[in-house]
Amino acid sequence: MAKAIKSFRGKNAFLSNFYPCLVEYEGMIFPSVEHAFQAAKTLDMQKRITFQVCPTPKEAKACGRKLKLRPDWEEIKIDVMRTLVRDKFTRNRSFQTDLTKLLLDTDDAYLEEGNNHGDRFWGTVKGEGRNELGKILMEVRDELKGEK
């Protein structure tokens, strides 16, 4: 059985949506997947701009919780996340940090966003949850393997 990565911290922090890297969403550039994901919750372009300049992913997440969600959010949020994660791992191939290589270097490891903040949708808490972010990461990794 393949190994498992059950935390996106330390040497595996690059798997986290909080990891600093440029991400594009609908023509706008954001400083992390988290910033872009929170901005995508609204159709108001002025509000989206505020996420581009939010100082940290944690603050972007807090601001995103205060938004009135776009009407189709529940139907599109997984696809939005997939789009952002795919962009993260294809856009950021610099000399210093090649995120594509880092993701491919996880080989066939099971990727699980284990957390202690109660997110059982995108991750797991004590091994329980949907782990949607982990599934998307493994899907993008498989797509990238196919491109090699």
Image (cartoon, rainbow, N blue to C red):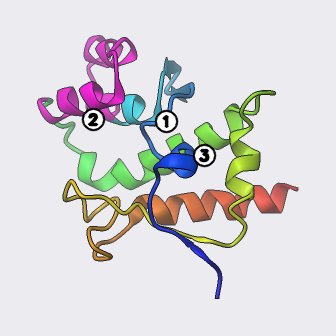
Please state which amino acid type lies under the numbered disc 3. Answer: Arg
Tag 1 residue:
19
Please state which amino acid type lies under the numbered disc 1. Answer: Tyr
Residue 96 picture location, percent across and down = 75, 28
For the residue pair 95 and 61, the one nearer the viewer reads as 95
Tag 3 residue:
86
Q: Is residue 21 above or below residue 14?
A: above
Please state which amino acid type lies under the numbered disc 2. Answer: Lys
The prevailing secondary structure element of the residues shown in magenta is: helix
- The CA span between labels 3 and 2 is 18 Å
Q: Which residues are magenta?
A: 38-66
Give the number of the disc on residue 88.
Answer: none
Q: Residue furthest bottom?
A: 1
Q: Residue at x 49, y 36 (%)?
A: 19
- The CA span between labels 1 and 3 is 14 Å
Q: Residue furthest right?
A: 148
Give the structural element (helix, strand or loop) at label 3: helix
Q: Earlier in the sequence, mark 2 or mark 1?
A: 1
Q: Nearer the viewer, mark 1 or mark 3?
A: 1
Tag 2 residue:
41
The quarter of the picture where the N terminus appears is bottom right
- The CA span between labels 2 and 1 is 20 Å
